[in-house]
Amino acid sequence: QVQLQESGPGLVKPSQTLSLTCTVSGGSISSGGYYWSWIRQHPGKGLEWIGYIYYSGSTYYNPSLKSLVTISVDTSKNQFSLKLSSVTAADTAVYYCATLGVVAATPSAFDIWGQGTMVTVSS
Amino acid sequence: EIVMTQSPATLSVSPGERATLSCRASQSVSSNLAWYQQKPGQAPRLLIYGASTRATGIPARFSGSGSGTEFTLTISSLQSEDFAVYYCQQYNNWPLSFGPGTKVDIK
């Protein structure tokens, strides 16, 4: 059973870059069948999909964040990562990594989630 | 972008009663809709995908229905562990989008 674990700094200064990593265990990130995704949840609010990466390196980002987001994959470490640049207080949120099922390039639901990591943007 | 709305925002239900939650999409998403349950301090958990298929390990008291733009999640007899926030999410169009959630609390 695939499990996900987020890691990274819990505090980031405004205008800096937020960097998080999701480590995949119990399965190979290169096996296909998933879009490896990032989702965030502002405090007390709903869920916002940030983007995904496929093991091949292809990506798709939410247009609302596209200019600021980079998602990358390291298949040798079985990890994928999120970088969000020029952060402001509005980027304070719990960040989740999750698997988005995919069949024939068609997405399905987010079936496996990491526990989430809280990131606060503050000087 | 497809906008998802959910109603009501809060639903107060007594244990053992039936709960009916609604989700609406701003345009058709076919049956490409999922429901999630989130408890405080936890990640969301997938309950339903394909509008009506229960995910692995989800009790039969959870059922989903609908297609197009109107969807329903029904919890047939609420258990204490079911009090939580429920989100719907469409995966028919990019970008993927979630509803704002319905909080089910104890009456």
Image (cartoon, coloured by chain):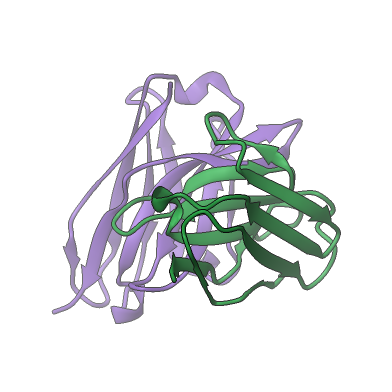
Residue in front for this viewpoint, A61 or B78: B78
Q: At x 76% / y 60%, what residue is drawn?
A: B71
Q: x, y (%) of residue B50?
A: 74, 43
Q: At x 32% / y 59%, what residue is drawn?
A: B40
Q: In the rendered image, what is the letter of the chain coloured green? A: B
Q: In the rendered image, what is the letter of the chain coloured purple? A: A
Q: Residue B28: in sight, yes or no?
A: yes
Does residue B46 appear to the left or right of B106 in the view shown?
right
> Quadrant where the C terminus of chain A lies?
bottom left
The total of numbered circles placed on residues is: 0
Does residue B32 appear to the left or right of A43 in the view shown?
right
When the figure is inspected, residue A3 is found, relative to residue B106, above or below; the finding is above
Q: x, y (%) of residue A116?
A: 32, 51
Classify residue B97 by image quadrant: bottom right
Q: x, y (%) of residue B30?
A: 85, 53
Q: x, y (%) of residue A21?
A: 31, 44
Residue in front for this viewpoint, A83 or B22: B22
Q: At x 69% / y 67%, what residue is drawn?
A: B22
Q: At x 23% / y 77%, what residue is drawn?
A: A14
> Quadrant where the N terminus of chain A lies?
top left
